[in-house]
Image (tube, rainbow, N blue to C red):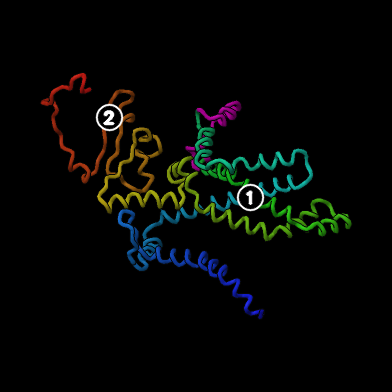
Amino acid sequence: MNFKHKFVFLLPGLLVLIGILIFPIVFTVRLSLSSWDSFFPGLDFIGLDNYIRLFTDDQRFWESFFRLSFFSITTVFLQYVLGFSLALMVWKDIIFKRFFRVLFLVPMMTTPVIMTVIWRTFFHESLGPVNDFFGLFGITPLWLSDETLAKVTVIIVEVWQWTPFMFLLLLAGLLSLPKEPFLAAAIDGASPLRKFIYVTFPLMAPISIGAIIIRLIEASKIMDTVYVLTSGGPGTATETSSYYIFIKGLRELCDEHDILLILDEVQCAYRTGTFFAFEKSGIIPDIVPIAKGIGGGFPLGACLVTKKASIGMTPVSYTHLPLPTNREV
């Protein structure tokens, strides 16, 4: 068979690869130039309107974007350092090597949302075991209420959850390294540190770059951890672009289809640094239930509404209605 004809057998796989790589890019560009309605699915071409809004009308998006970039870079760096260290430890001949391999993978085997709920309990300011420990030294950190500590908490949870993934990739890379360079270094009398600097680390560079890129892509989509742990707070201290797009999109969706947006302030009103917690979200709801903040323990309740929502709310008297019987109750 002619050598040129052999490439025909590669054509199906090449077409599949092109489809996997090119189609998502083309579709993403097409989506960015269109408007999307979840109630009536379809793409309406609007040109560069989305980009104009993004670059001119929405400063808060860029603040959340840079905050997301900080989280992504910081967490991936820590994951790489810890993952590489654990992989090097297990790579060597140590006691209970297989046990440690399984142990280091446990955090990744658990659903992120479930683990974030557990971590939120750990960092609870009055009930969490973390503050119980610090309380022994007379310290009570406000992990989820202080802006700086809230960011630290998000980083801790992300690093704990995804370091096993980095560990797994790097360990696979270490196990695939050729032995000859290490034997040559040992013959030359190189110390363990020099072996790592001049042999292990350079040989691991391609694998390290791939692992870092994969984790950066995933870390740029942080949403569930922030939503469960801090809800973007306190204020907007931990708000990422994904979370902000969700909040803003919810408001715009309600406006577009005349849906009333209700944000419950029964628990969080007057407790987040502003009069209402929704003030920090950048959106205004149509109905805001409030109760405990005005009742002080008494059974009082109230709700605030916009003029649009109040149209259907008129005071009436129910004294003319018959009392329900026991059967009706």
The percent coordinates of residue 80 (x first, y second) are 64, 51
Q: Nearer the viewer, mark 1 or mark 2?
A: 1
Q: Which residues are magenta?
A: 127-149
Q: Secondary structure at mark 1?
A: helix
Of the 4 image quadrants, the one containing the C terminus is: top left
In the visual, does 182 lie left or right of 63? right
Residue ID at (40%, 50%):
246
Gap between marks 1 and 2 measured at Cα: 51 Å
In the visual, does 196 lie left or right of 104? right
Residue flagged by tag 1: what amino acid is it?
Answer: Met
Q: Is residue 135 magenta?
A: yes
The percent coordinates of residue 9 (x first, y second) are 60, 72
Q: Residues within 10 Å of mark 2 (few under 14, many from 20)?
A: few
In the visual, does 61 lie left or right of 121? left
Residue ID at (33%, 58%):
41
Residue 166, disc: 1
The residue furthest front is 1
Residue ID at (56%, 40%):
110
Residue ID at (51%, 28%):
127
Residue flagged by tag 2: what amino acid is it?
Answer: Gly
In-front residue for pair 56/93? 93
Q: Quadrant of residue 287?
A: top left
Q: Is residue 161 above or below residue 6?
A: above
Q: Which residue is mark 2?
A: 301
